[in-house]
Image: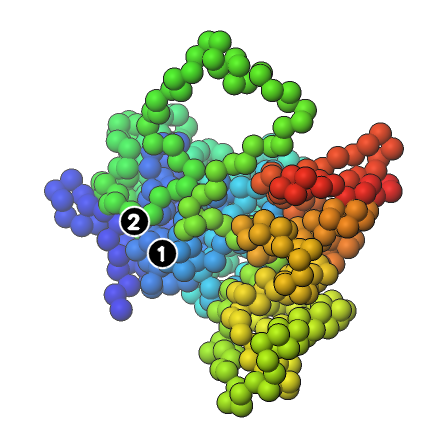
């Protein structure tokens, strides 16, 4: 396997290459103003080296989650986990050499810095036997390694800066090769930038940034004006992994694209004046549910609501071949109705076991198939079907043939697997006129001990018009299910 990739072409059309093996030892700094093509360059580097080396991307804007389907990256939504869970995931990533994208776009700046620091420190502190080579790409690095105090506390700044310094200064011996990208060299801590031996400098306009870029490229200061004249997607490269003398490179095309980039202008809506006013103000605002945002394509959709156990399952490769259950040789001794009742009973028994929702889905599925074998019946469902049936069971709906639940199950077909159990629990309470389940009960069937994750879960369900919250003046919460036209009884505050 070649360790050299083509990043683009020079002015004569000759290919400009990057030696990935040399890059692992010497690190890379990318600089360019917004719109210079910096993210395009990183995407090209990631796509071309995806089959060569493990990749870990710290993505503050969610630009790189589209790498998931074509290149097999696991998307970790930083907003969905707490510090302990992020550390556990990072340890598993190091151990199993999984290529991942840590998407931080759902967090505020200070939370992004905390999350990235915990993640990077765990990668750095891995046991010696897990020091595998990996590219660690940090976009908008000036956010995580600021040169001066800004809008965040000194504690958070020191924590994040320390993690970035470890990555760039001491990460090489641990197999971690930092690739950092920044809009402003002047805003990036010097001790972090100084550890890179390879540079790709894009268009920049401020004198202080041009001078620093020229110094890093070994150019005279009077030549720094050339950096201002670079076109979008054009960079000056230098370093042992790129070229021994500064070389101009036009970055080649990429196979994927960011999910949130607006390309060019769009036609304005035809409605104007009175027509637009009627669209905005015709209906009462207080009774309208939140508009449902357009979902991104399946290839770009992050696994943001996946439970940590499920995400760890992805990192470890989901269900190993040895765990894939073959149908039992002996035929079923029951008729179809008896088999369905037996399966419903097994699911109900499993749902009653303490902390069952905290176990990985693959482990639960294996337990389910073993119980079916003991009764000499065919499970009749794959892992995906089992996950939905088990979600029904923990919500108290073990029998999918019960007429009481048919309307609810029809609605639930479009509810994602990872949020199905909490939704069904809320809907069941509405159907029965029972009080709204409290956060503790929702956390139990969701498989988490984080109250923050439950708040984000409920916000997600409401944003997608699956539920509507109502809190009366007494502080009592009730939840409505718009598709059913039913509401739970109030939960006492």
Quadrant location, the N terminus = bottom left
User: Around disc 2, counting alpha carbons within 10 Å, would you say few (fewer than 14), some (14 to 19), or many (20 or more)?
Assistant: few
Q: Do we see residue 92 in this rendering?
A: no
Residue sitting farthest toward the top: 274
User: Around disc 1, counting alpha carbons within 10 Å, would you say few (fewer than 14), some (14 to 19), or many (20 or more)?
Assistant: few
Quadrant location, the C terminus = top right
Q: Where is residue 488 in the image (x, y as percent from the top left)?
A: 77, 44
Residue behind mark 2: 255
Residue sitting farthest toward the left: 12
Question: Which one is in front, 191 or 257?
Answer: 257
Which colour style is shown? rainbow
**SS at mark 1 in the image:** helix
The residue under the point 18% across, 43% down is 10
Residue 41, compared with residue 332, is above or below; it is: above
The image quarter containing residue 40 is top left
Q: Relative to residue 112, is residue 35 drawn left or right?
A: left
Question: Which one is in front, 227 or 319?
Answer: 319
Indicate which disc residue 70 carries: 1
**SS at mark 2 in the image:** loop
Q: Relative to residue 255, is residue 284 drawn left or right?
A: right
Q: Where is residue 260 in the image (x, y as percent from the top left)?
A: 43, 37
Residue 400, compared with residue 141, is above or below; it is: below
Q: Position of residue 96 (x, y in %)?
A: 50, 69
Q: Relative to residue 38, is residue 466 drawn left or right?
A: right
């Amino acid at each position: 396997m070649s360790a050299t990739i083509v990043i683009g072409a020079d002015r004569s059309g000759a290919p400009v290459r990057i030696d990935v093996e040399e890059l692992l030892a010497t690190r890379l700094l990318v600089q360019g103003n917004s719109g210079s093509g910096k993210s395009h360059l990183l995407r090209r580097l990631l796509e071309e080296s995806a089959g060569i080396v493990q990749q870990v991307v710290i993505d503050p804007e969610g630009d790189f989650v589209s790498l998931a389907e074509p290149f097999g990256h696991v998307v970790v939504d930083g907003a969905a986990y707490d510090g302990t869970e992020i550390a556990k995931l990072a340890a598993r990533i190091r151990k199993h050499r999984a290529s991942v994208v840590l998407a931080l776009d759902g967090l505020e700046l200070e939370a992004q810095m905390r999350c990235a620091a915990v993640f990077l420190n765990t990668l750095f502190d891995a046991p010696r036997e897990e020091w595998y080579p990996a590219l660690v790409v940090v976009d908008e690095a000036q956010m995580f390694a600021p040169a001066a105090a800004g809008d965040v506390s000194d504690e958070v700044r020191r924590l994040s800066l320390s993690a970035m310094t470890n990555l760039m200064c001491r990460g090489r011996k641990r197999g971690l090769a930092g690739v950092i990208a920044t809009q402003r060299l002047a805003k990036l801590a010097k001790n972090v930038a100084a550890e890179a031996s390879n540079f790709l400098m894009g268009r920049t306009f401020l004198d202080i940034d041009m001078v620093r870029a020229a110094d890093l490229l070994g150019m005279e200061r009077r030549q720094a004006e050339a950096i201002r004249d670079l076109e979008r997607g054009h960079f000056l490269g230098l370093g042992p992994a790129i070229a021994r003398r500064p070389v101009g490179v036009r970055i080649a095309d990429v196979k994927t694209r960011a999910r949130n980039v607006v390309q060019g202008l769009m036609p304005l809506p035809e409605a104007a004046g009175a027509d637009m006013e009627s669209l905005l103000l015709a209906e009462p605002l207080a009774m309208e549910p939140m508009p449902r945002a357009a979902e991104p394509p399946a290839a770009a959709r992050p696994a943001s609501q996946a439970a940590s156990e499920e995400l760890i399952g992805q990192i470890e490769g989901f269900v190993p071949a040895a765990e894939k259950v073959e149908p039992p040789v002996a035929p079923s001794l029951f008729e179809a109705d008896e088999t369905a009742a037996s399966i419903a009973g097994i699911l109900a028994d499993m749902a009653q076991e303490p902390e069952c929702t905290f176990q990985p889905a693959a482990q639960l599925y294996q337990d389910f198939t073993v119980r079916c074998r003991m009764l000499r019946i065919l499970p009749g469902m794959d892992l995906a079907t089992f996950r939905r049936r088990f979600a029904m069971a923990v919500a108290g709906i073990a029998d999918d043939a019960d007429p009481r639940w048919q309307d609810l199950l029809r609605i639930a077909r479009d509810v994602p697997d990872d949020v199905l159990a909490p939704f069904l629990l809320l809907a069941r309470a509405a159907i029965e006129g029972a009080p709204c389940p409290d956060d503790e009960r929702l956390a139990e069937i969701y498989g988490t001990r984080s109250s923050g994750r439950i708040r984000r879960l409920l916000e997600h369900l409401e944003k997608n018009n699956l539920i509507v919250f109502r809190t009366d003046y007494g502080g009592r919460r009730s939840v409505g299910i718009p598709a059913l036209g039913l509401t739970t009884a109030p939960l006492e505050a």
